[in-house]
Image (spheres, helix red, strand yellow):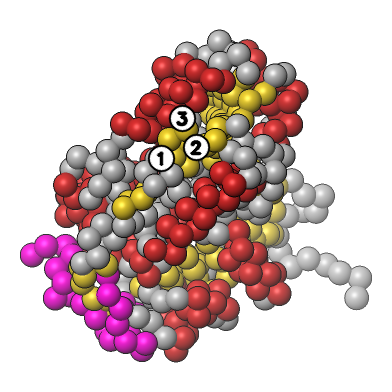
Amino acid sequence: MALLDPSIWTGKIYVNGWRDGGAGTSDAMEPATGNKLGSYGTASVEDVLSAARTAAAAQKEWAARKPEERAAVLRRAGLLWEEHAEEIGTWITREAGSIPAKAALETHSAANECYDASALPALPSGEVLTSNSNRWSLARRRPAGVVSVIAPFNFPLILSIRAVAPALALGNAVLLKPDPRTAVCGGVALMRVFEEAGLPAGLLSLLPGGAEIGAAVVEAPEVRVIAFTGSTGAGRKIGETAGRLLKRAHLELGGNNAMIVLPGADLTKAASAAAFGSFMHQGQICMTTGRHIVHEDIYDAYVAALAEKAEHLPVGDPAGGQAALGPIIDENQLKKINGIVQDAIAGGARLAAGGTNEALFYRPTVLADVTPDNPAWTQEIFGPVAPVMKFSSIDEAVELANASDYGLSLSILGDVGMAMAIADRVESGKVHINEQTVNDESNAPFGGVKDSGNGGRLGGAAANMESFTEIQWLTMRPDIASYPF
């Protein structure tokens, strides 16, 4: 039987087992064709509250399990991602509009996330402290409890599993709310993998739904930590609610990421890196290269080379296997992208390539001669658009890079010594020298600064331990202490 056999999950959510959702069903759609792919259950607020109560009860027993038992579940999950990579990848291609190579990256990364997480239960869980009293003093890590994971549509599997896997490995229970547009590849797939891996019932719940369900998985009393990936606007609301309720929120938000191209940089390689950074997955990535800051000596040649790349990238149905870019996720996102492009041109930008669409397929677009106040420069487009601006001095390049409300990822192409000096001056959660801006690995801490996040990090043992555990101070004396009362 296939892992994602529709007879298991059609019309269902998962709360301590597959069951009907309290809010009915929704359709999983294929943006490239408009075809219906299936039907999944939609959660109600009461479903969320029930899942949170179930999770809190199941978590206590799970946290008490031997570390090797929790590790074994994560290892089996990793193997299942590899075993069913083709099946799951097909869903990512069709439901998320991803080219097959990007879908394969997601399943590969999901396996690595689980393998890395399987090591967490065996890591040291605290430290021995010195004390001025006659006692032992320890600081030990304890599971946070119930964790809510809210994931977006663009990398539906990676941006779910990177929080789900370490949270479970460290002894927590998880409420997962995938984006409704990718509820199967970003939700059902995770649920089925962990179900087959032997995760005890109640520890992972699948709760698809809209904003009301997002609010419920944040506000449920049993939830102690929220891991959210999505827009800055939505992240602000979650952060405000979490602050009021004294919960921790790890917010990975938007980006308008800069690529600085230094004088003397190899133009052929730079244009290739730039095209990948701006056009990969139709630019629907928080780390997408959204601002190209290019030295004036090579500016014209760079624009021409990038435009040439854009003109020759095939756009179409990724299920056909020939496309470099697939569809935009939906009509609303398409209108936003095209609106910014048209406003940019009206504001003085020169259209060097693209700027057109057929249905949800938007051509990779290059905008030259952009000014700092142009909407294509100031806004996160979340589409296949590359705005380009020139600079004359390193100080100007740094100033342009930092002159953004966002600070997620930054790329510097060219002389390494010059790039190292720039790296020390830029405000960004990630800096990549001689690479483009879209980078992620399961063992690397991921997060942004400014409007790109609140400093929370996921990825790597230290960051995951910090994110999904609480520190408890524990002291011990050989006998009951004497007091002056």
Residue marked by disc 1: 354
Looking at the image, residue 468 lies above or below residue 365: below
Based on the picture, tell me whether residue 17 belongs to the magenta stretch.
yes
Give percent across and percent down for residue 51: 42, 81
Q: Nearer the viewer, mark 1 or mark 3?
A: 1
Give the quarter of the image for residue 293: top right
Give percent across and percent down for residue 185: 29, 61
Residue marked by disc 2: 351
Looking at the image, residue 35 lies above or below residue 169: below
Q: Residues within 10 Å of mark 2 (few under 14, many from 20)?
A: some
Identity, as a three-letter code, of the amino acid under mark 3: Ala
Q: Which of marks 1 and 3 is nearer the N terminus?
A: 3
Give percent across and percent down for residue 129: 70, 47
User: What element does badge 2 sit on?
Assistant: strand
Task: Name, please, the residue furthest toward the right.
Answer: 484
Quadrant of the rendering where the C terminus is positioned: bottom right
The answer for how far apart the CA atoms under marks 3 and 2 are is 17 Å
Identity, as a three-letter code, of the amino acid under mark 1: Gly
Mark sitting on residue 274: 3
Based on the picture, tell me whether residue 398 belongs to the magenta stretch.
no
Give the quarter of the image for residue 429: top right
Q: Are marks 1 and 3 in contact (CB under 8 Å)?
A: no
The answer for how far apart the CA atoms under marks 1 and 3 are is 15 Å
Give percent across and percent down for residue 182: 34, 64
Segment tinted magenta in the rendering: 1-28
**Nearest to the observer: residue 12 or residue 359:** 359
Identity, as a three-letter code, of the amino acid under mark 2: Leu
